[in-house]
Image (cartoon, coloured by chain):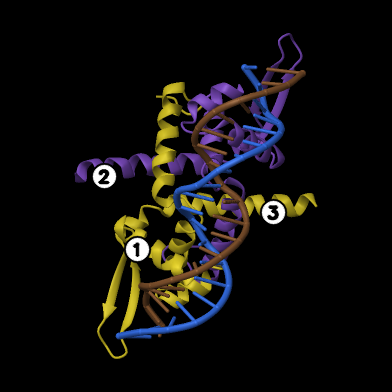
Chain colours: A yellow, B purple, C blue, D brown
Amino acid sequence: MHETLQPTSNECTSRLASISDALYVIGGKWKLRVIVSLRENNKRFNEIQRSVEGISARVLSAELKELEINGFVKRVVHPQTPVVVEYQLTPYADTLSGVLETLSDWGAMHRNKLRSER
Amino acid sequence: MHETLQPTSNECTSRLASISDALYVIGGKWKLRVIVSLRENNKRFNEIQRSVEGISARVLSAELKELEINGFVKRVVHPQTPVVVEYQLTPYADTLSGVLETLSDWGAMHRNKLRSER
DNA sequence: CGGTATCCCACAGGATACTG
DNA sequence: CAGTATCCTGTGGGATACCG
């Protein structure tokens, strides 16, 4: 059961498909950033918008809807006055922890590499 | 040194930045797919194009250039006749292994989840 | 084969204004 | 605050043709 020295072509072809599957739901410019913001305990619409630099209300609204449809986010309305809306990550969103971790670790490493090169 | 139960807000803010850094170079529709294809030992232009479903020559050409600029790919010309061009992943591209692995694992898991739900 | 050149357009997404 | 509506632009990227 030795592994990962050099994956076979078939293994890699399926990797290509799996990567595509992943990118289909969490790809794009904003999805992961919004999720990370939610993990940061930004739960309110405007909080999220402020923390995700550059996203517009219209786009954030759309992204949150997609994330909800795909089971990552739950929209909770607290019927007080004034009404408070809260976005929560679902347990399913936690399955992304590994992805987020390796990606942000890599991003940090890459940034450091660039800095040290200049 | 316990960790990762609930990251602090600051840790997460920097995660947001790191994720953005990562997405800046490997985000977008094609970058990771092209890299995976190269790992699959597709080294020739047309091989890559055939394996990455849907990519056009123009776009693949542009992606390969960006990947080269960012240090993931090396373009090697073998001066035979006819000339053969080969694209190779650099050692630096290997630093993406973890990202690719978690992402494709997650993609496979997600696909299975969707299938079992229908 | 390994691309480049052109042309074109759908659509992601920004800006701004507005609403309950 | 939590969005929606409108309008508009940029550009990612497809199609096709062509070249050394």
Label 3 residue SS: helix
Per the rendering, the mark at residue A112 is: 3
Toward the left, the furthest residue is: B118
Per the rendering, the mark at residue A57 is: none
**Label 2 sits on residue:** B114
Label 2 residue SS: helix
- First along the sequence among labels 3 and 1: 1
Per the rendering, the mark at residue A65 is: 1
* Mark 3 residue type: Asn
Picture coordinates of residue B62, whole percent (x, y):
64, 37
* Mark 1 residue type: Lys
Mark 3 surroundings within 10 Å by alpha-carbon count, few (fewer than 14), some (14 through 19), many (20 or more): few
Q: CA distance from mark 3 to mark 1?
A: 35 Å
* Mark 2 residue type: Leu
Tell me, yes or no, whether the two marked residues, 3 and 1, touch with CB atoms within 8 Å: no
Instruction: Give the residue drawn at x 45%, y 28%.
Output: A12
Picture coordinates of residue A81, whole percent (x, y):
29, 91
